[in-house]
Amino acid sequence: MALNPDAFDFLSNLSTLWSVVLGALLATVGGLAGGQLEAFLEHRRRERDAALFFAEVLSTLKIILDLSAGAKKVGDPFGGVTMRMLRSARREIDLYERNRETLYALRRGDLRARIHTTILRLTMPLDGLFDAATAIENIGVQMRTPHLPELERKELELRLAQISETRERSFEFLMESIAQVKPLAAELGAISGQSPDSLERAVMNG
């Protein structure tokens, strides 16, 4: 029995249809895979940029605070040089605060939490040092008041001693907290591809 020529046309059309369907399917899968790959690469780039930024901030903080510890040993422990360095450290924390949402580009939640906790541990004693400096300055002004009653002078001297002791403890806590920075910088360096030592050299030479 001879096949109808229309049957060949049908088979040919069916083959063409399957080719079109298969091509569309492959294009869709390829588009999805390409989109996911592009999204992955973009997220990876953002993560590296975030890791590099926070590693630089932490490395800068460590260097400034290490220098302030050295300055504290020379002359007035909390004189102009030491306080200027501490204010520079506070500006680095302000920079972190302005860019804190970038922290979420880091995929590891534990790393994000440790970075933020370390910054908080540095912020509290720093702000305490500035508050103490203001309080000590105000007490100094009061103690220079002419004909200050002896009882009031003794109360001011007692407050001055207490605030000075609190200031010293705040600085000690600050130095203890800065020890946590280097391990964090190392982890961030592994993500960004920059070693902590090269970051520190870049900060020192910047």
Image: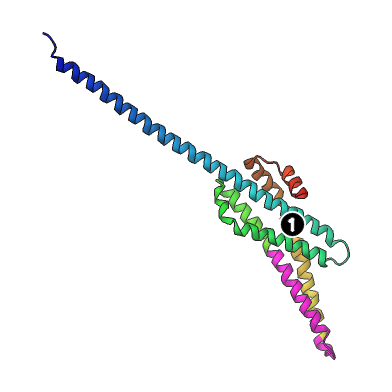
Q: Quadrant of the N terminus?
A: top left
Q: How many marks?
A: 1
**What is the x, y in percent for residue 63?**
76, 53
Residue 146 located within the stretch drawn in magenta: yes
**Residue 120 appears in the picture as rendered:** no
Instruction: Name the side, left or right, on which 140 lies relative to 42.
Output: right
Q: Main secondary structure of the magenta part?
A: helix
| Callout 1: SS | helix
- Magenta range is 124-152
Instruction: Name the side, left or right, on which 183 lies relative to 3.
Output: right
Identify the residue under disc 1: 176
Image quarter for residue 98?
bottom right
Identify the residue at the far top of this view.
1
| Residue at (82% x, 88% y) in the render | 151
Q: Is residue 198 above or below residue 12?
A: below
Image quarter for residue 140?
bottom right
**Residue 181 appears in the picture as rendered:** yes
Residue 9 located within the stretch drawn in magenta: no
Residues packed near mark 1 inside 10 Å, few (<14), some (14 to 19) or many (20 plus): few
**What is the x, y in percent for residue 183?**
69, 47
Instruction: Name the side, left or right, on which 99 lies relative to 77.
Output: left
Residue type for callout 1: Glu
